[in-house]
Image (spheres, rainbow, N blue to C red):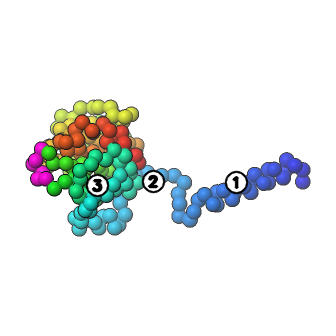
């Protein structure tokens, strides 16, 4: 065996060893197409359990919210499955009344909707709550183009935004009145 063949064999052995060490059992090399809740998370949502204090930036499995404003006192996982769609999110809130304009609330949701491909589809999206039925405008935040509209009665006061992150994955954000000016930073800081 000449030197070149030895180096080739060592390289192949090292590559195989690195692959075996780097990929533990059950791990996948690619990220899932859409973050989905665990059975325990779905149960917490069904039982309407709250977290005091609220969870932090990684409250939604598979999603990171890097710009999370302060001042929340509790949070809640929200999971809704219907018609082949999974809506999975987290609501941060404080103890003020919902009609108080100073009420601090933030809702980040990921919707696994296989038909989602274009931003315009969000106007007629089959979401149970938080539809873009008003007069949304298109705004660009940190490289993302999103539909933005005023929050309606069901969502409370503030700004509601949504975009197609990638095929089949929609992200929506409802930022309460105190966070209107931070909506761009919140959207820019969301990572899937």
Res. 40 in view: yes
- How far apart are labels 2 and 3 at the CA level? 19 Å
Which label sits on residue 90? Answer: 3
Q: Residue at x 31, y 42 (%)?
A: 186
Marks 2 and 3, the one that precedes in the sequence: 2
What residue is at 33 percent from the left and 34 percent from the top?
141
Residue 11: x and y in percent read 75, 51
Task: Tell me the element at label 2.
Answer: loop
- Residue holding disc 2: 32
Q: Which residue is mark 1?
A: 15
The residue located at (48%, 52%) in the rendering is 31
In this orientation, which residue lies closer to the viewer: 110 or 116? 110
Dot 2 or dot 1: first in sequence order is 1
- Spatial distance from mark 2 to mark 1, Cα to Cα? 25 Å
Region in magenta: 96-101
Q: Nearer the viewer, mark 2 or mark 3?
A: 3
């Amino acid at each position: 065996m000449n030197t070149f063949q030895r180096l080739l064999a060592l390289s192949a052995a090292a590559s195989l060893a690195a692959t075996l060490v780097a990929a533990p059992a059950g791990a996948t090399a690619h990220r899932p197409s859409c973050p989905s809740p665990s059975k325990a998370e779905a149960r917490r949502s069904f039982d309407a359990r709250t977290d005091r204090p609220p969870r932090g930036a990684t409250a939604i499995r598979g999603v990171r919210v890097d710009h999370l404003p302060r001042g929340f006192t509790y949070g809640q996982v929200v999971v809704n499955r219907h018609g082949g769609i999974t809506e999975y999110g987290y609501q941060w809130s404080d103890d003020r009344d919902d009609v108080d304009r100073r009420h601090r609330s933030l809702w980040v949701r990921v919707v696994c909707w296989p038909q989602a491909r274009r931003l315009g589809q969000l106007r007629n999206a089959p979401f149970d709550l938080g539809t873009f039925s008003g007069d949304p405008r298109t705004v660009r935040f940190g490289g993302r183009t999103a539909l933005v509209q005023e929050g309606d009665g069901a969502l409370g006061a503030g700004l509601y935004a949504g975009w197609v992150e990638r095929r089949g994955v929609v992200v929506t954000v409802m930022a309460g009145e105190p966070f209107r000016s931070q909506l761009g930073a919140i959207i820019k800081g969301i990572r899937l």
